[in-house]
Amino acid sequence: MGYCLFCEKEPTETYFGSFCVNCRKIKNLGNCYEFPRILEILTKCCLRTPEQLENKIDNHKKTKTNDLVDYDKPTTRSKKVIEKSV
Ligand SMILES: [Zn+2]
């Protein structure tokens, strides 16, 4: 059994196969969604410097706390009825 032609680390899934189990899944995703799209997703989502990752984490934390502090309850039908009667 040889090694996967894609990752070059794992053994191939079958004796005459070219890819390991995980790389076969990646290849199948590429066949379904087109490889340029897969590359675009990976580039936009996964390629970040450690500073960019920290900024993203901080922004996410800020967004979560702001959501809790500045949360306005939506006006429901029952509340509208009360406002009309007053
Ligand atoms: Zn592989």
Image: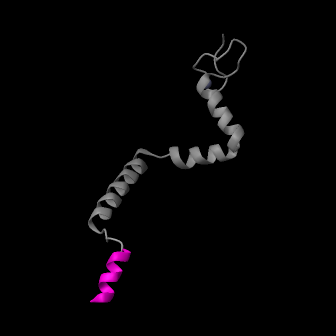
Q: Position of residue 28 (x, y in %)?
A: 68, 34
- Say above or below: 41 vs 15: below
Left or right of residue 60, residue 31 in this image? right
In the image, 49 versus 59, the foreground residue is: 59
Measuring 29% from the left and 69% from the top, which residue is drawn there?
70
- Say above or below: 25 vs 10: below
In the image, 68 versus 5, the foreground residue is: 68
Question: Is 84 part of what is drawn in magenta?
Answer: yes
Magenta span: chief secondary structure:
helix
Question: Is 41 part of what is drawn in magenta?
Answer: no
Measuring 66% from the left and 10% from the top, which residue is drawn there?
1
Which corner quadrant of the figure contains ligand 1?
A: top right
Q: Position of residue 62 (x, y in %)?
A: 32, 59
In the image, 77 versus 7, the foreground residue is: 77
- Say above or below: 62 vs 44: below
Tell me how many marks there are: 0
The image quadrant of residue 68 is bottom left
Task: Using the rendered image of the protein, determine whether residue 45 is visible from the camera's viewpoint.
Answer: yes
Q: Which residues are magenta?
A: 76-86
Q: Position of residue 59 (x, y in %)?
A: 37, 57
The image quadrant of residue 86 is bottom left
Task: Using the rendered image of the protein, determine whether residue 35 is visible from the camera's viewpoint.
Answer: no
Q: Position of residue 19 (x, y in %)?
A: 66, 23
Measuring 41% from the left and 48% from the top, which residue is drawn there?
53
Measuring 51% from the left and 44% from the top, which residue is drawn there?
46
Which color scheme does this rendered protein use? Answer: one colour
